[in-house]
Amino acid sequence: MVQLMKAAVFVEKNRIVLEDKPVPDVGPLDALIRITTTTICGTDIHILKGEYPVEKGLTIGHEPVGIIEKLGSAVTGYQEGQRVIAGAITPSGHSYACLCGCGAQDGAGSKHGFRAMGGWKFGNTIDGCQAEYVLVKDAMANLSPIPDHLSDEDVLMCPDIMSTGFSGAESGGVKIGDTVAVFALGPIGLCAVAGARLMGATTIIGVDTLPERMKVARGLGADHVIDFKAGDPVEQIMELTDGRGVDVAIEALGTQSTFESALRVLRPGGTLSSLGVYSTDLKIPLDAFSAGLGDKRIVTTLCPGGKERMRRLMEVCASGRVDLKPLVTHRFKLDDIEKAYDLFGNQRDGVLKVAIQP
């Protein structure tokens, strides 16, 4: 008899619903994880709105925290019943992309066609985590044990939001004494603030307009938080920096206006670190790019994954240097995930992140 589980499934544009699906079979290198906590990401909203295409019937979600239910016959070093997380990006560890140091792009440009999201498989090319169970392929490259003293919510941001936000500061090359601007203080932007602080930035400027987000940003290390509705953010940042500009600007929303503003506030030789998911073509203004002669850099980063990345992020959580639990503002049971999507998708009630528990 086929064992069934509840799963949040993409049906069509503007419809993700809870359905019964078979529990996945476990291959030799796989692990079946019983989900104890997961969440909804902004990228899931892009899927819901039809802005990012996935196949109908796919289980959505890519941020798993759970317990090993069953291990494949060739998996070693783990045990059933162990608490684990896996990153939103699940590199195989043996692809060309992995072996040239870019595991996040594992799968991009394959014979099956180009996938801009590379190693993002959960809820993109395979069934994801907003379910009672998820199958983790290449388990030995991706499962990271959770230290006993950390709760599910302590580590819930690690698989995606924390890894992505921190990577904005890492790819931007933030150094001790740097001035950093972060455009958009959603969950990823807030983690970028925390990451920039950890890397040594001494002046961090956040840009948003929602009071709840601006307050959290200050708690995570923002020295200045400016409201873009109170005036041109470029002018405000240039005034704060005495006309010098910032060393690194992190774009964490994915719009032409935030991208362009991030470019305009850079000092000569500065770096624009782009984390946003863009749904339309970008244009680079001639003057903002100094006609290509300003020694400026534009770098993009897809959330780093794999078990070593997850281990390091959990070490940060355990250290107490960063507390991301305030980002979880709402909690739902899996049975109520459609209500959670309605709340999160419409950004009501000061929502930042929701915790979903089967």
Image (cartoon, rainbow, N blue to C red):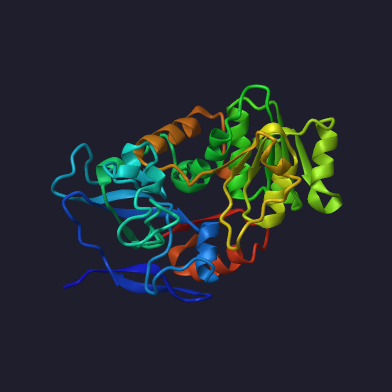
Q: Position of residue 351 (x, y in %)?
A: 63, 57
Question: Which quadrant is home to the C terminus?
Answer: bottom left
Hey, which residue is sitting farthest top in the picture?
A: 176
- How many numbered discs? 0
Could you tell me which residue is drawn at 58 percent across and 47 percent down?
Answer: 188
Q: Position of residue 179 (x, y in %)?
A: 71, 30
Q: Is residue 133 toward the left or the right of residue 222 in the image?
A: left
Q: Is residue 158 toward the left or the right of residue 172 in the image?
A: left
Of residues 57 and 132, the one drawn nearer to the viewer in this rendering? 57
Residue 121 lies, with reference to residue 57, above or below; the image says: above
Could you tell me which residue is drawn at 58 percent across and 35 percent down?
Answer: 172
Q: Position of residue 144 (x, y in %)?
A: 34, 39
Of residues 77 and 53, the one drawn nearer to the viewer in this rendering? 53
Q: Position of residue 330 (x, y in %)?
A: 57, 56
Q: Is residue 17 toward the left or the right of residue 268 in the image?
A: left
Quadrant in the picture for residue 271: top right
Residue 344 lies, with reference to residue 118, above or below; the image says: below
Of residues 77 and 249, the one drawn nearer to the viewer in this rendering? 249
Could you tell me which residue is drawn at 35 percent across and 50 percent down?
Answer: 66
Say if residue 233 shows up in the picture: yes
Of residues 279 and 160, the one drawn nearer to the viewer in this rendering? 279
Could you tell me which residue is drawn at 54 percent across and 69 percent down?
Answer: 339
Say if residue 214 shows up in the picture: no
Question: Which quadrant is home to the N terminus?
Answer: bottom left
